[in-house]
Image (spheres, rainbow, N blue to C red):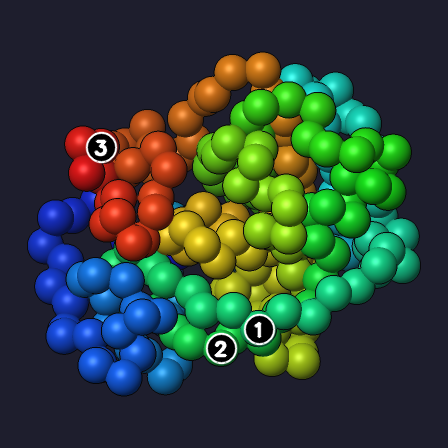
Amino acid sequence: MADQPPISRGFRAKSRPAEHRDRIPPGQHLVSDFPVLSAGPTPQIDLTRWRFSLRENGKILQEWNWEEFNALPQTDWKRDIHCVTTWSKLDTRWRGVTVDDLLRAAGLGKPPAPYVMMHSAGGYTTNLPSADLAGGKAMVATLYEGKPLEPEHGWPARLVVPHLYFWKSAKWLLALDFLPENRQGFWEELGYHDYGDPWQEQRYVGD
């Protein structure tokens, strides 16, 4: 689910520290903790039943259980992240499977369709152009700072798309469904921006 509360235009950010201005988008401020913001309750997930899948227009292309998913190539990342509620956190450390490696494991050299919908436990969805998940831009992470994700931060697996606002980094991820045309997800249908570039302050429709 998304890393922000219900829609509001009342966001007020502190000034960006001058020494990090090239890493902190406009309207953002630094935090040292990791705020927990979701669109609903933390789902209860049974790892023995957990499955992650790549799909094309609803059809499963490849599916992995927990053991199979963790046997895929693992990558370590250090990235800055930015939430639409105006906080930014620098040098966060993640470990998981890049979307590129997931595509390769499914026998695909590139995304099979131009758009993708992310599906999470609890029914949350968010959408993106497929190009924003490929080319080293996104990961399905299982570890944060060397430890399994906390349940409230998306355990057992969450998407990490650090170049966009963090509501696009869907928690409790279960599937990537590649689509021939764009469809809006949960927050996008409620007025959030369809893309969410923090450097352009794309928080809402029309930004």
- Residue 117 picture location, percent across and down: 55, 31
Q: Residues within 10 Å of mark 1 (few under 14, many from 20)?
A: some
Q: Three-letter amino acid code at disc 2?
A: Asp
Q: Are marks 1 and 2 in contact (CB under 8 Å)?
A: yes
In the rendered image, which quarter is residue 13 located in?
Answer: bottom left
Q: Report the residue marked by disc 3.
A: 205
**Front disc: 3 or 1:** 1
Q: Is residue 110 visible?
A: yes
Q: Are marks 3 and 1 in contact (CB under 8 Å)?
A: no
Q: Three-letter amino acid code at disc 1?
A: Lys
- Counting residues from the start of the chain, the first of labels 3 and 2 encountered is 2
Q: Report the residue marked by disc 1.
A: 78
Q: Circle 1 — which element? A: strand
In the rendered image, which quarter is residue 57 located in?
Answer: top right
- Counting residues from the start of the chain, the first of labels 3 and 1 encountered is 1
Q: Residues within 10 Å of mark 3 (few under 14, many from 20)?
A: some
Residue drawn 19% across the image and 38% down it: 207
Label 3 to label 1, Cα distance in Å?
Answer: 30 Å
Q: Three-letter amino acid code at disc 3?
A: Val
Residue drawn 34% across the image and 44% down it: 196
Q: Is residue 108 left or right of residue 186?
A: right
Q: Nearer the viewer, residue 86 or 114?
A: 114
Is 201 situated above or below 71? above
Label 1 to label 2, Cα distance in Å?
Answer: 5 Å
Can you tell which mark lies on residue 91?
2
